[in-house]
Image (spheres, grey):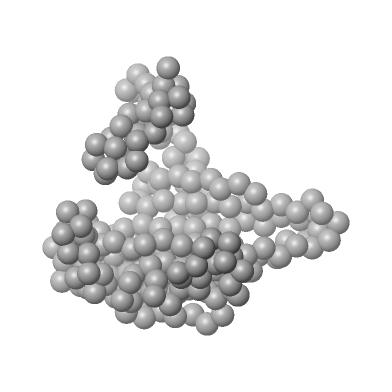
Amino acid sequence: AKLECCGSPQHNAEVRRLPLSNAAPEARELEVGVFAEVCLETQRRDMAHPGFVKLTVNASMEDDVLLFEKRASDAKDFKYLYCMLLGPSKARWCTDRLVMPGRGKSVTEALLQPILGRESIESPVEPGICARVNAAVKAGGAAQYYFVMGYAPTKKQALMDAQELKAELDASFDLAWAHANSALRFAGLTRGKAELFERMAGKLLLGLPQKRTDELPGAA
């Protein structure tokens, strides 16, 4: 198994692809999970009033798309967050971090928690994305799962973008690869230098932890 990620050149969204293969002589069953915090505000407002920001988020499920809506917001570009976990097995969702399985436990303890049995999609106190699915792979077989997440200014646009991405999951990776290589050639940059500049921007703009120079590909 390996996780592949790309940003969609056509939508304000990202797609993650998880191919699974089973070389064993017997069938295997794995638990695939997605966990993330939800923020539908600017970084400045979220840091200034995190509790208030969290209490103004609604969650709902429409057409197999999980939607988070920011109430009374002037941040129009990301009023809605949409996400999907797609694959051979149906995912179960929880939208409140306060009731997520494994909360308050170590990673090892959380992994021993039973899979989320009943969906809990409601207006959350601590908005978060929790999705779990039982992924069964036959002996010598393979399976593929996709996680899609993006932002949209309206519910209609969010649902439309989600369905378009669902119809072109693998094509999104091809388009992202072509778009990225074209942008690098136009800027006259190598992949190593581009990653270095991205890490520098992450440190300066987002306050991400600084990495050692020798960990950066192409930094020399």
Q: Residue at x 37, y 62 (%)?
A: 37
Q: Residue 106: x and y, percent?
A: 51, 63
85 displayed left or right of 219: right
* Image quarter of residue 36: bottom left
Q: Nearer the viewer, residue 206 or 195?
A: 206
Kindly tell me whether residue 3 is visible in this rendering: yes
Q: Identify the residue at image location x=43%, y=77%.
A: 99
> Quick one: which residue is furthest to the right in this view?
25
Q: Which quarter of the image is occupied by the C terminus?
A: top left
Q: Is residue 86 visible?
A: no
Residue toward you, 80 or 203: 203
Most extreme residue toward the left is 74
- Taking the spot 45% from the left edge, 34% from the top edge, the residue there is 178
Q: Quadrant of residue 182?
A: top left
| Number of marks | 0
Instruction: Depth check: give the residue in front, 69 or 185.
Output: 69
Where residue 94 appears, as percent x and y from the top left, is 45, 74
Image coordinates of residue 42 in percent, x first then y, are 20, 55
Is 184 situated left or right of 153 in this image?
A: right
Q: Which residue is at 54% across, 51% downward?
A: 17
Q: Position of residue 154 (x, y in %)?
A: 25, 66
